[in-house]
Amino acid sequence: MKVIDLRSDTITLPTDEMRKAMFEAEVGDDVYGEDPTVNLLEQRSAALLGKEAGLFTASGTMSNLLALLTHTRAGDEVILGSEAHILWYEVGGASALGGANLRTVLNEEDGSLDLGSVEATIRPDDLHYPTTSLLCLENTHNRCGGTVITAEYTASACNLAHRHGLAVHLDGARIFNAAVALGVPPARLTAPVDSVCYCLSKSLSAPVGSVLCGSGEFIERARKKRKMIGGGMRQAGVIAAAGLVALDTMLDRLPVDHANAKRLAAGLSRIPGIECSVEKTVSNLVMFGLSSHVPTDAFIDGLRERGVKMAHREGPRFRAVTHRMVEAEDVDRVLEEIQKIVSKFTSH
């Protein structure tokens, strides 16, 4: 029986083409700037996102950390959403390693931040206050269910931040999913931000890596921070090669993941005992909840016994992520298994 793993798109395995490229990769010492495969990946990434330069890193968490370390000084304050990945899932690295204070603004349902609230949160110039130096956005937004923020919103947020002397970093782990969902080039979504990163190891199916992009001067400083935290990876072309294949082969197939997510959300919405919004499913993340009639533990155990893995959030909330290794027939099987589990508790 095939195990259908919907926990995350990070579980995707590299394609045969990626494995071949990794085996044949031309490499050099990246710390000296001499790995041609890494250099090409950084250049292509920057061009795709409309930036001057890129920096290959081990993970999205590392890219976000480097952005915050580069944009801020110890004691500075960073404004970000109450549901931001940087706040929830990155081990407080910006505070622990950079001395930055993270100050939150409530995320709206679509992942955006109310700009009036953002402006009210920016510290005035006062001897007693930390300096607010950075605004962080996220697109697509993980904890808000894969929602997207538009180019127009991002431009407005950047105009506000820049007017007050703040830089803007965009956690764009799934920025190509956002571009597909909105039907715009990715560079349009990233044009006004000062830095942006994306993940190669999520829906792009590469085994390792992220790329941080920004101005040439910003990346030069971030490169030094990367070395400081142990991120100089020497002959990293063996993994960067898979990233180049991902950019060549994975971007055009992202709509398939979105269609499968819609298929899953639509099916879930028709199952009594499941609460799921088809309209709010706009990328490859599907958020849903269980009614009080369905015990969470029994639901989790039932899924596992039937070969389905899914991320359990707080309480009755679940997240399912579609990706290259999930096909339409897998979605149908998941729906059948969920129907069987839930019907035990809702049919009487």
Image (cartoon, rainbow, N blue to C red):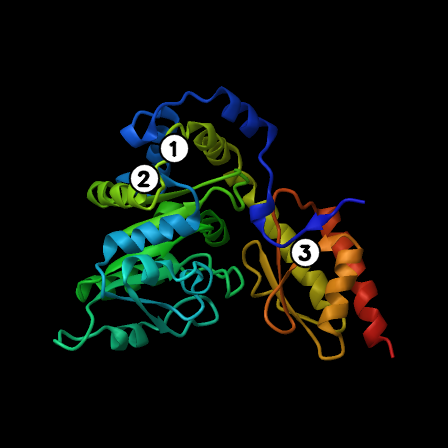
Residue 73 position (above or below residue 52): below
The reply to whether residue 220 is visible in this rendering is yes
Q: Give me the residue at 38% from left, 33% from top.
A: 41
**Front tag of 1 and 3:** 1
Gap in angstroms between the C-alphas marked 1 and 3: 34 Å
Q: Which mark is residue 54?
A: 2
Check contact, mark 2 vs mark 1: CB within 8 A: yes
Q: Which residue is mark 1?
A: 41
For the residues labelled 2 and 3, the Cα–Cα distance comes to 36 Å
x 54%, y 29%: residue:
18
Q: Amino acid at mark 2?
A: Gly
Q: Which residue is mark 3?
A: 263
Q: Amino acid at mark 3?
A: Arg
> 10 Å neighbourhood of mark 1: few (<14), some, or many (≥20)?
many
Q: Amino acid at mark 1?
A: Leu
Using the image as rendered, state which of residue 327 and residue 234 is in the foreground.
234
Q: Is residue 234 above or below residue 177?
A: above
